[in-house]
Amino acid sequence: MSRIRPSSVLALAVAVAGWVAAPLLAAPGRLSPERLSWREISFQGSKFGISLRADLKLEPISAAGVEQELLPSRRGAGIAPAEAGALALALGSEVLDRRSDIRLLVDPDSGAALQRVQTDSGRKRRIKSLRYGELGISTVRTRPAAGEVDLPSERWTDVREGGDDYPPLPEGGLRVSDPTALFYVVAASDVARPGDSVGVPIFSDDRLLLVEAKVLELRRVEVDYELGDGTAWRRVRGPTTALRLSLEAHVVGGDGDGGTGDASFELAGLRGDVEMLLDPVSRIPLELSGRVPYAGRVAIRLGRAVERSEPAAANAAQRPAARSETSRR
């Protein structure tokens, strides 16, 4: 059994209540899926001949459907879905010679992660499943054993179970989320103006982190993407105003000195100094930037967005400020 090396409960309390000045996701009303006008988004970018691509799809799932997917938890009771079910986030990303497909189940009202299954292909082939529990994370890692590289993953025999316990948590605990959930959490949160922020506890690379998603400024940007329902499309291009957010992380109990150390995490193939541009009206992420090996800082920009079948009430009367052109494909 592995354990995230704990610092003191006091250090954690300072990190939770002090380092992240914003209220945590546990605060009622911080998240609302009704703020979102979209259900699918696609990004792409390149630098120095290195191409990046990321596609994200949101799909609500019933509680019964979620229960069929959930793995057992070996770190206390597994985080259970609400009566209304859960939200599935399917994120596919490509960078260098690696393809990663993630299926994440989250509580749409709290942002808490229930389960993550990541399938990596290309140079590094593996399946890593994480089941979120009250006391920590249960993991199952599956890889091809010798002679199994060309076999389908269902026939791989190198299966290893493990997990990590959370460090001591404040009374009442934390609702721990996942890096992939940041797409949803930021868009569904109530951040709307410079200085607004929300604290997101996430588990990444065997560490518990606190991510502060903070609005740094309103920025005038140029956009060029397709927006539609999957059949009819209109091109949205021109200047618009976006919220520029930093996603700054801090290790909780990582090395015994109050939480300092490497706090980088990966989101859609980007790692380190991650920032997001968000449309404040539609809540569509317009751009994600961060660091990539051999290329340095790279930005991936929105190329296409699929609208929800029933647009969010708050956004129904408002449209992107950029110019749009209708087409059908």
Image: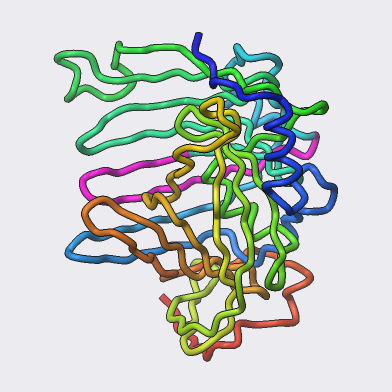
Dominant secondary structure of the magenta stretch?
strand
Give percent across and percent down for residue 147: 14, 15
- Residue 68 shows up from this direction: no
Q: Quadrant of residue 320?
A: bottom right
Nearest the viewer among 282 and 192 is 192
Nearest the viewer among 287 and 93 is 287
Specify whether residue 63 is painted magenta.
no
Nearest the viewer among 212 and 15 is 15
- Answer with left or right where residue 268 lies relative to residue 298: right
Name, please, the residue furthest toward the top. 1
Magenta residues, as a range? 83-102
- Residue 293 shows up from this direction: yes
Give percent across and percent down for residue 226: 46, 76
Give percent across and percent down for residue 258: 60, 33
Task: Establish if 170 lies above or below 230.
Answer: above
Tell me which residue sits at (48%, 54%) in the image.
Answer: 56
Name, please, the residue furthest toward the right. 28
Task: Establish if 318 lies above or below 278.
Answer: below
Tell me which residue sits at (58%, 46%) in the image.
Answer: 181
How many numbered tags mark residues here? 0
Tell me which residue sits at (49%, 45%) in the image.
Answer: 90
Name, please, the residue furthest toward the left. 147
Tell me which residue sits at (58%, 77%) in the image.
Answer: 242
Give percent across and percent down for residue 184: 61, 53
